[in-house]
Image: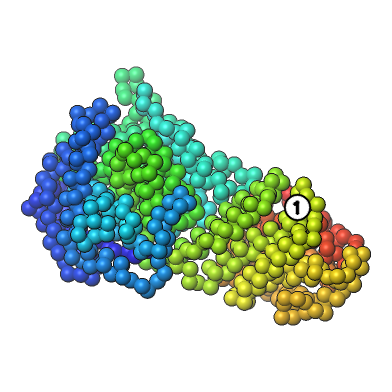
Amino acid sequence: MRNITLELMRHGSDHNQLLSPGLPYLAVCENAPVTTVYLPYEHEELLIRLASLAYPDRKTKYTEAQRRFQLTDIGRTLGRLLADIPGLTSAVGVAKTDQSGKPESVFNAGNAVSADRPLVNLRLVLSAKELALVPFELAIAQAGLPGTAQHLLLQLVMPFCITREARRAARSFYCSPKNPKILFAYCDLPNNAVPSEAHALALREALSPWLRAGAKFSDTVTVLRNAALTDITAACRLESYTHVHLLAHGVPHDKDELNNSFFAIALRKPQAAADEEPFERVSASNLARALSPLEQGQERVRQPTVVTLATCQSGATQQIPLSSKGESIAHALHEAGIAMVVASQFPLTFQGSVVMTQQLYKGLMRARDPRLALLDTRHEMARVVPSSHDWASLVCYLSLHPDFDQDNARTEIQRLNQALIMGDLERADIVQQADEPRFVAALAKIDAFNPSGLVRVADTVLLNTTRAGIHRRYGAWLYNPPNSVQTAAHRAQTVQQLRLARSQYLAAYEKLPGDYWTLTEALRLDLLIAVLTSVVPAKARVKVTSRLSQTSTGLALPAKQCWQMLASLSDYQLAAGLGTPSTERPTEHSYDRPWVLVNAIEILLLGNVMGWADELADERATKLTQELVENYPINQHPRRALIAQLKRYDTDLYRLLESGGAPSALPEALLGVLEMGGGV
């Protein structure tokens, strides 16, 4: 995605100024010369125009015709303003002709909105608080901008996104959380409920692909019903949330010391007297403090990465910005250090708020580029609620690190891995509902996956191993399909899928030889392929596995020699005490201690099953399993991975590796050790 930075500045403090046609702003765009621009509105005039954007059913004095006229008139005016900035039109022209990289594709609800066209994000950096009042998202493209005479953010000639950034924002950058934890807080007003159930369902739908088998919605999402500000503060002190979704009504705040009104969020007032309002009007600064508590025992502030405000006009600023208190709620949260804040600058329909939540969180949960998620969300809101301008109401404050594209690629692959392998396929395995279309769909998703910034070797390795895991599971399913008798065709298809999995693991090992767990996987699959393709009868399987010690079909070394090399590498890591107590999936290497243990146990298990290990292998594997149990709880990835590996050897396919026909007792014994540790 091509980023174009446009900064609008003026002299003086960030508040205490009204919009005026005679007030000059300096426009700095990329490396183009500085340009002076003038907003063609008096402050009061723009306030009246924006007031007419309230929907007629909200008991306003404005008609539908007035609303539609202002959408077009304001859009054209702001479009001319942007088109008159030479640096911007020049940067857009460069983006059109830039052939330095492969264009990306944009997807909207699974269908291509625009394919093979450059994507542009206009990064709008603002300091003057009165500019938060200007709805740049309404701009209609004029000559020099893509999609002339169409709304800039809806045209498809060159998909366009606008994100805002506070110039004085604390230097915190957006990074896709690997393990999202969401706080969903909502508050009803008397006789005016919010669509809390619809938002909860939208969050559930967005999260469902990423939940592990047996996991509950409540494990990832905490719901605060009819929340007070004190409830939000307490929740943020007890738990570290990556995302906060706030559903409430936007209301005018009490006038400040300068008799100046601004927008606030209506939350429940604890212990309200009978003659008082049952809700309190929460200002931007108070909400920012509630979401940013000090970590217990630490000297740093703990903040969510993303805050989404499904509240009317939470992105709008106070009518007359003479006080530093009355900034836009979204602007204030961003200045307080929250990397991504999504809000509404106009009244928002209930249906529009639900679509926003569902579509935006779908993208964020898969670790998609937030700019693309925002673009998809706008298009979906325009499609689902075509009679509204909810799509233009969406305003996003976002800070990205210059290396974001490269850094986010790995997280996006990890989330895809969680969805395809640890999510959908694992849940299907447990309830015995896996079927061929699931595997075909998973492979189609991984084949179509092409994240931007995929340049690091470790990222491509993770993509290889994700694809290998799907092929391996597919092959195991084909070998013993449920409700069906195995045929020669099934056996041939099993071999085909295992070969594809082996080639992916080998490709990963060749890229990162230090990450030798991939070679362990390739060796096991290679042995299975050799047995499946052997013409020796099953009762003579001992001869087949004995012969495998001398030759191998897909590896550079004979199978037993390859295993001995892996065992030596594992012994060295264990003897040298390599490994840190991390439980993340291996990245640049497999030296994290729990994964060193898991890989060593797998190598010993494979040697035991094949008859290659010495008589002490069982005892060593048991001790390593005990170390894993004592130091790492069941809910962490290494323990779950080992359990899955051990259970694999109790399937018909993996019993083919038994040398001499007698099944090994080691997998069951190790599962017993894990069971004593809890959780199997």
**Residue at position x 27%, y 59% in the image:** 146
Q: What amino acid type should be assigned to the residue bearing mark 1? A: Pro
Q: Position of residue 24 (x, y in %)?
A: 11, 57
Q: Mark yes or no: residue 184 visible.
A: yes
Relative side of 177 to 55, left or right = right
Give the total number of marks visible in the rendering: 1
Q: In which quadrant of the rendered view does residue 498 lie? A: bottom right
Residue furthest top in the image: 274
Q: Residue at x 67, y 53 (%)?
A: 436
Q: Nearer the viewer, residue 467 or 364?
A: 467
Q: Identify the colour scheme used.
A: rainbow
Question: Compared to 397, does 549 lie above or below?
Answer: below
Residue 243 visible from this viewpoint:
no
The structure residue drawn at horizontal position 27% and vertical position 33%, both measured from the top left corner, is 55
Q: Secondary structure at mark 1?
A: loop
Q: Is residue 504 above or below residue 647?
A: below
